[in-house]
Amino acid sequence: MNKLYVGNLPFSLTEEQLESMFAEHGKVVSVAMPIDRETGRKRGFAFVEMENKEDADNAIQHFNGQTIDGRKIVVNESRPKVRSR
């Protein structure tokens, strides 16, 4: 899987800005920034899908632990959602 979880993002960051940042390290297939249903605000994380594993690994190495607008971001391989009962 080439889908990455990007956490602790500044709320001011847009999907377009995130896509542009990750595109410097490979081909970005999609970017999704979930919105809180109740408040309508960004939730502070995103999912970035890269074209291949090499690009995804490259992005993880470059961005994990980087500081953006004073926030140290977390970038790792996205894990499948676990459904609770």
Image: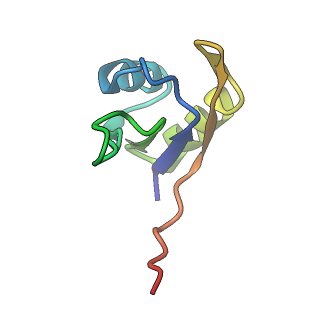
Residue 14, percent from left and from top: 35, 22
Residue 57, percent from left and from top: 60, 42
Q: Residue at x 35, y 34 (%)?
A: 28
Residue 16, percent from left and from top: 30, 21
Residue 7, percent from left and from top: 56, 39
Residue 59 found in image quarter: top right
> Is residue 30 toward the left or the right of residue 7 in the image?
left
Scheme by which the image is coloured? rainbow
Q: Is residue 10 above or below residue 32?
A: above
Residue 46 found in image quarter: top left
Q: Residue at x 46, y 68 (%)?
A: 81
Q: Is residue 68 above or below residue 35?
A: above
Front residue of 10/63: it is: 10
Which quadrant is the C terminus positioned in?
Answer: bottom left
Q: Is residue 9 above or below residue 21?
A: below
Q: Residue at x 66, y 18 (%)?
A: 67
Instruction: Work out which residue is located at the far right of the displayed protein and give it.
Output: 65
Front residue of 54/79: it is: 79
Q: How many marks?
A: 0
Instruction: Work out which residue is located at the far front of the displayed protein and give it.
Output: 38
Front residue of 62/39: it is: 39
Instruction: Work out which residue is located at the far top of the displayed protein and give it.
Output: 69
Q: Residue at x 68, y 22 (%)?
A: 66
